[in-house]
Image (cartoon, coloured by chain):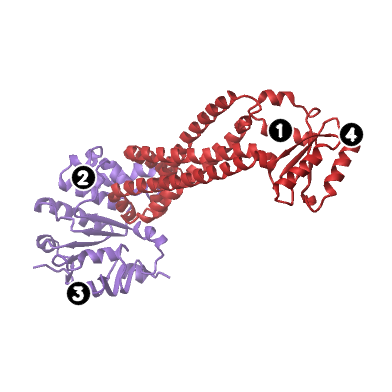
Amino acid sequence: MFARISYALRETIASFRRNITLSAAAVLTSAVSLLLVGTTFLIQRAFDNLLVQWRGDVGMIVFVRPDASEEQLTFIRQTLEAQPNVIDVKKLDYLDRAASFEEAKRVFAGDRTTLSLLTVETIPSQFKVVPLTTDPALVRGLADQYRNLPGVQGVALAEDEFDVISTMSSFVRGVTITMSLILLGVAVTLIWNTIRTAMVARRNEIEVMKLVGATNWFIRVPFILEGLTQGLFGAIVSCGGLWTLNQAWTSGVAGFKTGTGVSSLVVPGSYVSGVMIILLVIGALAGGIGSGIAASKFLDV
Amino acid sequence: MITLVDFYLRMIRFENVTKLYGSDVAAVREASFDIPKGEFVFLVGPSGSGKSTLLRLMNRQERPERGTVWVAGANINELADSRVPYLRRGMGNVFQDYKLLMNKTVFENVAFSLQVIGRPKHVIRQQVPQVLELVGLADKEDRFPSQLSGGEQQRVSIARAFVNRPLIMLADEPTGNLDPATGEEIMSLLDSINRTGTTVVMATHDHRVVNAMRRRVIQLDRGLVVRDQERGVYE
């Protein structure tokens, strides 16, 4: 067993060296496509940060002062629930101060100044309201009505903040996902072609191997490992690129004024690490699948 | 169930075997014969008569359209693809163009046969020098094929085929690229391998080789077996 593993590894390294130009091209293409995949994840996360407050068709947020009394809170809830014809009462959601603080950590991820001013004690709690009506005038009328309730700090409307971001998010997501899928396809094809070329170049060796009794898997494994390595190397390069990109982005966002909302676009390092692991898995899988198909299809060279 | 009769009297058996290329070009037609264990058989005939196809049918590089090929008591037509490598481990193959790996040394070429079937290093280190000694290349194990003569390259090819001590050796025109004197040396080597009990089937159209050896001759003409003669000659 050890002899076979050792043979497979030696052959993989030797073949990688022999086809260094094609291998480098496959690695770079994988890296670029995976970088785009990673960037898609980060862009999506950045937009999610902006939109996190408005998830689930929330059309209005009623902010309650942190010093509001239990009676005031109950009165606000009862007022909201008293209008089942214009508000989806079942979807009415209340975020207490602790939950609101957790949400604020995402919204103000890149705005450390604002975040440092917020605490669980000073942050307003909030009612997330899903309006049943689509009439903007009616929703504005409701907002004006709620603003005057005792204990209410303010009311925010989705249409003021949400629509442009949401449209832009969908557009950017569509474009980046399409491009990354196309490039991923190109990377798999290039790896497939690299392995095919390697197999054709070694057709005499493969013929001899088959005639002396090597199993098909024994012949295939070094080629599959070679493709997997190309995909994995591409993923490692793309991880480096993604980390650099995110660092540059975070520094750039820090230059914006606080309160502009741009700070929400910062993606935390823990999330980037998660994306990097996903990229490594996708890279290895893409390389393994591309080379696996080639190694099976061109075994009879 | 493989019986001793199968094993000794029918190491290779062809029963009405027909192999077509395309829909109607018959490379081999209705071929039937038995080759017992330890026999030395020449397949003779002009180019295109079906000699190489018969060898390719024996090691399952080809499958017949009709008829059955038996090797060591097993019907190899019905052998699952995954079992074919194990069939081939019992066979050595020698080619006219040697099919050596030019980037490997003599030792590595011979060791390759053992490596790819997973033999451990200590076995390889023991068996390869033995077989190189047998073929007279013990002092050239570090040379590359390009540094050897044609005859020496064919010896390496034979060493690679024999290092696994196969039951059967299939040789396709092994003297085709060699001068007569070197061809005789190669035949002498194949003869000595045959004397160890290995069945040797050799395709050739070299009259001198066949007539000098006087072994069994199966003659083909346009895919048909036209003669099967003990201690035969080839005119």
Q: A111 or A232, which is in the foreground?
A: A111
**Which residue type carries mark 3?**
Leu
Of tags 4 and 2, the one toward the viewer is 4
Residue drawn at x 25%, y 70% is B22
**Which residue type carries mark 2?**
Gly
> Is any atom of residue B41 visible in this view?
no
Tags 4 and 2 both on a single chain: no
Q: Is residue A15 left or right of residue B55?
A: right
Residue drawn at x 34%, y 40% is A22
Disc 1 chain ID: A
Of tags 4 and 1, the one toward the viewer is 4
Of tags 1 and 3, the one toward the viewer is 1
- Shown in purple, the chain is B
Q: Position of residue B145 (x, y in %)?
A: 21, 42
Name the colour assigned to chain A in the rendering: red
Q: 10 Å neighbourhood of mark 4: few (<14), some, or many (≥20)?
A: few
User: What label does residue A69 carry, if any?
Assistant: 4
User: What label does residue A104 carry, if any?
Assistant: 1
Q: Which residue is labeled 2 in the image?
A: B136
Quote the CA–CA distance across marks 4 and 1.
Answer: 22 Å
Kindly state the secondary structure of the residue where label 4 is placed: loop
